[in-house]
Image (tube, rainbow, N blue to C red):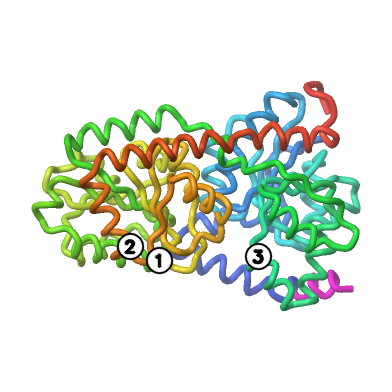
Amino acid sequence: MLRALYSGLMLLALPLIVLRLYWRGRREPRYRAHIGERFGHYPQARTRGAIWLHAVSVGEMRAAQPLVDAMCAQYPGHPLLLTCMTPTGRDTAQQLYGVKATIAYLPYDLGILVRRLLGHFQPRCLIVMETEIWPNVIAACHAQGVPAVLVNARLSEKSLRNYGRLPPVRALIGHAVRQLAAIGAQHARDAGRLAALGAPGLAPPSVTGNLKYDALVDAAFVARGQAWRAACGARAVMLAVSTRDGEERAIAEAYARAFAAPEREKQLLVVVPRHPPRFDEAARLLVEAGLTVQRRSADEPIAPGTDAWLGDSMGEVAAYVAMCDFAFVGGSLLPLGGQNLIEVCAQGKPVLMGPSTYNFADAARAAREAGALVQVADADELMRVAATWFADRAMRDRHAQAATAFAQAHRGATQKTLALLAPLLGASGGKP
């Protein structure tokens, strides 16, 4: 009954969803591409027995890379289907897996649309990254005998409380969770919350760890970043990566207040907004703060008088991290939960974050305890710590060593996740 009501509401909301899609397409035309896929119409070749992995956007698609690579090696006879929800997620999938996967958008969460996908690709199983629980997607898979698995799963205490405030929503999501064939959680706390959400009747989730720790850093991007760093000479580099709306202004103004022009000549601020539509706005805010700005897209050497370099490119995060001496990870000065600190630690770079880290609560806690992460209250405190790190290379090196040790200590989730999937995927190799 609840799912029927949910489906009815989804159907009523569909015109508004499509209008919003076209509205977003004014700034990002790619939102208007491949519209048919969102309604279950696929021009891609039909498959049979595909391993279907869904990752909503860029972060989840990148996190899936070690698992995708391992599955391709272990199950070469199975076609691979990757679905996502955003153009940036699709671009990331194309960049990482384009030669070995079929890439498409997940249809809107209506049973008839999901059944079109199932009929076209005939997947062997569905693997969902992190917290994408779509009731009709899971119900349609369950009805057609396609096992659905949640991997790299996380559920914050805040999200669980929010479900509790809306009993019908909790019941709807709880029923979907109980239809999952298996769950691989990032941490024991996530496993406990997911078990509570799916109670009664949910088998205990497994704790498989976080796949983000297993992600391999592309050597070509590291080399690119190191070349940028070498071109900076003796200047130390602070990276502000995955910044969100509201953070670029705070960082630019605090940086200008904290460091006078002579100090800025000895260091460089690199700002990489998380979303491409913010590139022009971020450039404007840096200039308004009184900083001399260059843009990566200009493809010119960084001039000695440049205060801030704007990373207005996609897919080069690893290069920006390789370039820096330390990094602030965005989405954390504002109550947005923070972005991925693990990819910074993986390159042995110490991390600064604001107070909001609930998206990576366990990783942030462990990194802080290991000495790989320092949390600050606001942009001014961020610059006070940055000033100390700019001045004290030995301190930076100690935090960098802690970051490397922290990242290495938490690897191994890929093999645990493969073991969880093995009963559903069958023997290695061979045709499905």
N-term-proximal mark, 3 vs 2: 3
Left or right: residue 299 versus residue 28 is: left
Query: How many residues crowd mark 3 within 10 Å: few (<14), some (14–19), many (20+)?
Result: some
- Most extreme residue toward the left, as rendered? 262
Could you tell me if the residues under marks 3 and 2 are in contact, i.e. CB atoms within 8 Å? no
Q: Residue at x 88, y 52 (%)?
A: 142
The answer to whether residue 356 is magenta is no
Alpha carbon distance from label 1 to label 2: 7 Å
Left or right: residue 111 versus residue 89 is: right
Going by the numbered disc 2, the residue's amino acid type is Glu
Going by the numbered disc 3, the residue's amino acid type is Glu
Q: Quadrant of the N terminus?
A: bottom right
The foreground one among 292 and 19 is 292
Could you tell me if the residues under marks 1 and 2 are in contact, i.e. CB atoms within 8 Å? yes
Percent position (x, y) of residue 78?
Answer: 76, 29
The chief SS type of the magenta part is helix
Percent position (x, y) of residue 20?
Answer: 56, 70
Percent position (x, y) of residue 61?
Answer: 58, 44
Disc marking residue 157? 3
Going by the numbered disc 1, the residue's amino acid type is Asp
Badge 1 is on which residue? 245
Of helix, strand and loop, which one carries label 3? helix
- Most extreme residue toward the top, as rendered? 430
Magenta range: 1-9
Alpha carbon distance from label 3 to label 2: 29 Å
N-term-proximal mark, 3 vs 1: 3
Badge 2 is on which residue? 248
